[in-house]
Image: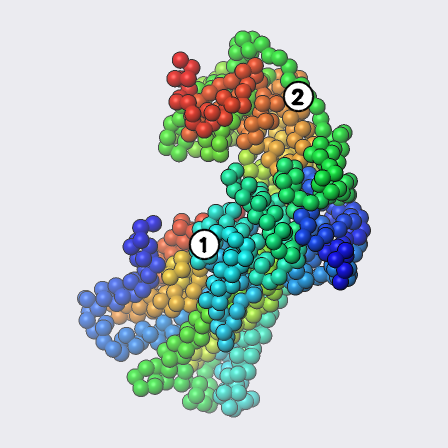
Amino acid sequence: MHKSLNYISKYFLLFADILLIFLLGAFKPRFWQMTNLIDIAATASIIGIMGIGASIVMMVGEMSFGFGAEATLIAAILGGILGKEYIPIYLVAFLIAILFACVVGVINSYFAVILGVPAFIATLALSKLWDAAVTYVNEGRTMYYQNWPDAFRILGQGYIGKIPVSVIVFIIVAIAMWFLVDKTKLGSHIQAVGNNASCCRQMGINVTKIKIFSFVLCSAICGFSGILAASKTGSVAVNLGSGMLLNAIAAAMLSATFLRPGRYNIQGTVAAAFLMAIIKNGCTFYGFPDAVQDIFNGVILLVAVSYIAVTRKEGLPSVKVGG
Amino acid sequence: MLLSTPLLEIKGLTKGFTGVLAVDHVDFKVGRKEIHAIIGENGAGKSTLCKMITGTYSMDDGQIYMDGKEVHFTGPADSMAAGIYMVYQERNLISYMTGAQNISLNAEVIKGVVVDEKAAMEKAEEIKRQLKVEIPLEVEVEKLGAGEQQLIEIMRAFSATPKLLILDEPTASLGEGEIEPFLKFIKGMTTQMDVSIIYITHKLEEIFQIADKVTVLTEGKVTMTAEIADTSQNKCVKAMIKSDKMKEFAVPVKDYEDLENNKLLEVKNVNYGGKTYDTDFYICKGEVVGFYGLVGSGRTEAMETIAGIRSSDQKHFIFDGEEITSGDSYKMISKGMVLTPELRRNGIFPALNLIENVCSLYINKLATKLGMVKKKESAVFAKTILDENDTKYASINQKISDLSGGNMQKIIIGRSIRVENLKLLVVDEPTAGLDLGAKSEIYVKIRHLADELGKSVVFISSELEELLKTCDRIYVFYNGNVVKELKREDFSKEVILGYTLGGVRSAREAHA
């Protein structure tokens, strides 16, 4: 491939972000207003955090469809223990909810890694259980408690100066995960396992442990994204997380076109989350029907995976192409 | 620690898979700074033996001693810690990592919590100096050649202090020019460093160049252990092959004029991938015709196009007196032409059992009118074919992927030749990866088809020797075109190799 072309494809996501912001604003300059751009960042932060969780599990060569249901479940657990005042202190309740998320990760990895059920099927089946639990506890309605402490809303609705707390949290999570994945031994092994697990086993790397860790970390992050989303809407809808599922998977998939073609990476997930947030915001801003947004997202995901299928013969760690 | 204690000693090592002993009470010793070759045919148990030494496989029985002390390895991590490192036949690298990163994999230098890339590079450079090799270390290994990738794996062993290197068929992935320097490098390693090598191979020439000792494995048992100076290639071959396994055959002298009155297939040119190639050839009834050429020379592509497996913009050839201009593989099979694919895995259904694999070609015959498979008939039919072809199997319900390559090939060919009204069988690389005994069985089968049953066979192969031995005529392919035809009486290795490398213009000019 020509060098400059290579460069364009490597940074395509970033160019697309900038180009879309430019185009959308060109017809309605109000799109460029600071409040709107900040709103885009806030939307990107929720998709992006779940996307980062998804990338971690995809990096080890597994696939999960449980991100959404897990997010809803964890948000409902936090909302429930706070609302019913089992534990009135937000931070403690928060930690307990995240601990539950880790348990969900352990359950996922029990089926996917220990028993060897294909992970996307195991997580799909488990996600039905989480959905059922939430529906049962909420009695099919959206969860809302008057007595939720103010802290419940800070993550999603609070501001530090002019910057939403969610955006700051997103930056922290992204930097922490980028550091873990790209700089530490553990992160290097996570990526290596996805590339060639048998080689890792030969080199004495405990592939099982690495995979379990990734599932647990993924569930914790996805659970956190659920808490964030619930905090933003001030309620826990039954479909809170499932609405974000495809966007999160798409963000992680798209990351494999960015920077290091063929390999998922945090930087790309962040750029892709922004792309989807811009599309979402733009569609609302221009008053397009919801279908338009779905078409955009679907087409972008198809183009991205097709690009990978064509340029990378061996496919992606979690989506093997061919036999 | 006495110097006379062998570095590695194994006693009575045994391992069975589904009732068959892959390694059967094997004893042997590896001395210090020694290159110990293990030779044997495919399936003789060489790799299984070594995987037990590294702890990748558990053993059913036996003991392993390192430096005179008994060891129990539960995995490669244990054996690596003890200084044993195995380089597999298939590459075991992280493709996107650089050479230096691969060498440091799981032996990373950590600065604080961060992986120290600079230290990894320095370490790799140090190993490079120590081994006196030339290789780029800052390039992703996926961009390196097979030989270089293998070198990276060997270098990886030296990120610790290896005492014993196990190399599994290391020259299998090397090109012609790479083997000689590689052997020198291996020999140099043991003379300059305190390291021993177990060298698994089936290439006898190599062991006489570098090995100090040789152990021959046959069907899981040691049939010979000798100092290299006390043995010969002939003795090794005798130890490797039980004489009753080699099948003999003769190629009858053919009357070509008579044959040419009975042409089965006539082809002027073939078209695939948007191009038309000049492939002037014919196949007569009752003859075995070899197709020789480099990989990609069009020998496979031409026959796949004719068999209807490869798509073609325009087709035109004569098969059994009939002009054929279209049709897929199903049509050609019903006309009596069957092709067994170049890649064995494309000829089997790995997850299905032997019955299903054998009967796959006969699904219509073995089904009721409503499309239900007749189970009993299928099993009986499958068993007949398996027995006719001397296939070794434990149960007719076992998965085909559990069988050895030779037995799989017997099933693929065996089911193909039972096709009703078979006229032409095309076998593409049928002997790839098979041992000498199994190869000879395939040759006998091919000759039997032509000589006794009067069928025609196209034998595509990269091994010129086997074509010279079994064929009545040979066509040489170059760049998609047929560039030479030779009858058996004119067979000449030099001429064929000359045409293979494109030494002579085109078929027509050569004929003129």
Across and down, in percent, residue B509 comes to 39, 17
Amino acid type for the residue under numbered disc 1: Pro
Amino acid type for the residue under numbered disc 2: His
Across and down, in percent, residue B447 comes to 64, 21
Q: As drawn, is B346 to the left or to the right of B207?
A: left
Write down the residue under mark 2.
B448
Q: Secondary structure at mark 1?
A: loop
Q: Chain of mark 2?
A: B
Across and down, in percent, residue A197 comes to 57, 58
Tell me if mark 1 has few (under 14), some (14-19) or many (20+) residues whose alpha carbon lies within 10 angstroms of its own. Answer: some
Above or below, B86 against A173 in this view is: above
Q: Residue at x 65, y 56 (%)?
A: B194
Q: Earlier in the sequence, mark 1 or mark 2?
A: 1
Tell me the distance, in whole angstroms, between the alpha carbons under discs 1 and 2: 53 Å
Across and down, in percent, residue A152 comes to 44, 85
Q: Secondary structure at mark 2?
A: helix
Is disc 2 on the same chain as disc 1? yes
Residues tagged 1 and 2 counted as in contact (Cβ below 8 A)? no
Of circles 1 and 2, which is in front?
A: 1
Q: Residue at x 75, y 47 (%)?
A: B23
Locate residue B405: give its quadrant: top right
Q: Residue at x 43, y 88 (%)?
A: A151
> Can residue B424 be seen in this snapshot?
no
Above or below, B112 against B24 in this view is: below
Q: Of residues B285 and B155, which is closer to you in this image? A: B155
Q: As drawn, is B83 to the left or to the right of B281?
A: right
Tell me if mark 2 has few (under 14), some (14-19) or many (20+) residues whose alpha carbon lies within 10 angstroms of its own. Answer: some
Above or below, B41 against B424 in this view is: below
Q: Which mark is residue B136?
A: 1
Q: Residue at x 73, y 42 (%)?
A: B227
